[in-house]
Amino acid sequence: MPGMPLRLVVGLGNPGPTYDRTRHNAGFEFIDELARRTGASLRAEPRHQGLLGRARIGDQELWLLKPMTYMNLSGTAVRSVASFYKIAPEAVLVAHDELDFPPGVVRLKHGGGAGGHNGLRDIMARFGESFWRLRIGIGHPGHRDAVMNYVLGRPTAADAEAIGASLRDAVDVLPVMLEEGAQKAMNQLHTRSNSASSDHPA
């Protein structure tokens, strides 16, 4: 099975200490974990309105991006970097928080709708929808009126531990995705997530 031609990995979140480690910043945390694992450094790139760095996984080099535009304008930075480096949507992976999954569950998906996520909605509006998504479970507060405060709040210690474990699992399968393809990576990732879900029911 051919590997996946990934060139840009984006983590969604809001900049600044107010939002640090909040549930909505799970995508930022994924990029941080990936940078730590690969020894990559991110630096401010004003023309792209984000923090940008390069990582090497096996024989493949990837751009890592954390948009600094706030969540609802995430597409600005994604489109800027992708346009500058001539990266097609199909070669982009966007990591984001996912209300529909409990903490500890992470899923890989290609294309689809925004599902109410403002960051995804803006990327789709500016860049199209045929990018890959890494959906990082954060759980749901139980009522839609509570969602805003929930995603902008910090998880409990137990939930933070589960989310952290899922991020490490996701970084673990990136080499599989690059070398053996998305389906193999999905199978491996979803098997791990199913185990986490049974340990941490929604």
Image: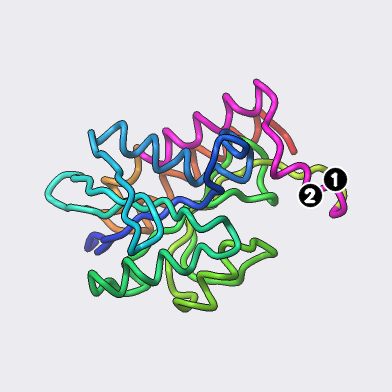
Left or right: residue 142 compared with residue 83? right
Q: Which mark is residue 150?
A: none
Label 2: element kind: helix
> Contact, CB < 8 Å: mark 1 with mark 2?
no
Nearer to us in this view, 74 or 11: 74
Nearer to us in this view, 118 or 116: 118
Q: Residue at x 36, y 49 (%)?
A: 51
**Percent x, y of residue 109:** 49, 61
Q: Which residues are magenta?
A: 144-171
Tell which circle, 1 or 2, labels the residue nearer the N-terminal end.
1
Quarter residue 181 falls in: bottom left
Closer to the eye: label 1 or 2: 2
Residue 165: say if magenta. yes
Q: Residue at x 49, y 75 (%)?
A: 129
Q: Which mark is residue 142?
A: 1
Left or right: residue 195 compared with residue 175? right
**Percent x, y of residue 27:** 50, 46
Label 1: element kind: loop
**Percent x, y of residue 3:** 23, 59
Q: Disc 1 to disc 2, how far (Cα)?
A: 8 Å
Question: What quarter of the picture does the C terminus occupy?
Answer: top right
**Percent x, y of residue 63:** 27, 54
